[in-house]
Amino acid sequence: MIHQLLETEVPYEYRDHDSKAEVVWNRSSVTPAMRAQIKGHTGKCIWFTGLSGSGKSSLANALEVELNRRGYHTMLLDGDNIRHGLCKDLGMSEADRTENIRRVGEIAKLFADAGIIVITAFISPFRADRDNARKLFKEGDFIEVHVDTPLDICEQRDPKGLYQKAREGKIKDFTGINSPYEVPRNAEVKVSTAELSLSELVTHLVKYI
């Protein structure tokens, strides 16, 4: 059966691409639907965006804990963690931030294709970058969550001391201070950690899984 499959299926597909290399798409015989069947649920991306200190990471972590408790297969991608490895070569310029989110979007898509619910927590300040990540997914498989916590509250929290450093001029291109944050126009969900508890927010978010 395996030999017949390998002999009859055309393994390559010539797709339009913007890669700098001479490449063709190599088809996989195991589809996302087949992987999802094994896991008992489809893969998708829950994309948290918001200012530093808005509560993205805490909320993303709390959501993953609850989904894990319910038996879902998940993976959490956190902004700072990704910059320790995959994106350690990138700075904080607009071009580097765009590339950072491009890479995260591609990784999130791979996890989703594997049948995993991937949760991302990134400032992702530019609307076009988030929209490009969304385009990688089928409709309904990308859920943008805007953690809409006001700047003054984020700055009061300042858990990493970054706002103070930005105000002192020690950090350049800091979102909300000297670099813009483009508010989502059509996010599936908008929440505020200044108004509701983590448990209340998680209960709300689980409805979108």
Image: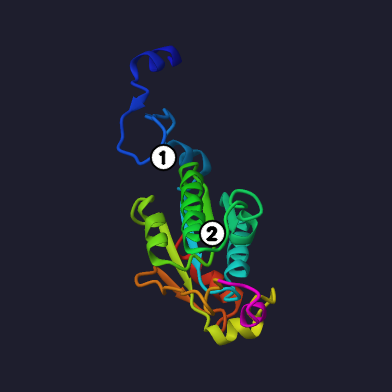
Determine which of the numbered discs, if any, sits on residue 204 in the image.
Answer: none
User: Which quadrant does the N terminus fall into?
Assistant: top left
The foreground one among 9 and 96 is: 96
Tell me the magenta residue range. Answer: 164-172
Q: Amino acid at mark 2?
A: Thr
Determine which of the numbered discs, if any, sits on residue 33 in the image.
Answer: 1
Q: Is 10 on the left-hand or right-hand side of 91?
A: left
Above or below, 79 against 193 in this view is above
| Local secondary structure at mark 1 | helix
Q: Is residue 167 magenta?
A: yes
**Residue 82, position in %: x, y?**
61, 54
Q: Is residue 143 magenta?
A: no
The residue where tag 2 is placed is 120
Q: CA distance from mark 1 to mark 2?
A: 22 Å
Residue lying at 59% horizontally and 56% vertically, measured from the top left = 76
The foreground one among 146 and 181 is: 181
| Local secondary structure at mark 2 | strand
Locate residue 65: give its quadrant: bottom right
The foreground one among 186 and 100 is: 100
Which of the two labelled residues, at mark 1 and mark 2, occupies the earlier sequence position?
1
Above or below, 110 against 168 in this view is above
Above or below, 129 against 111 in this view is below
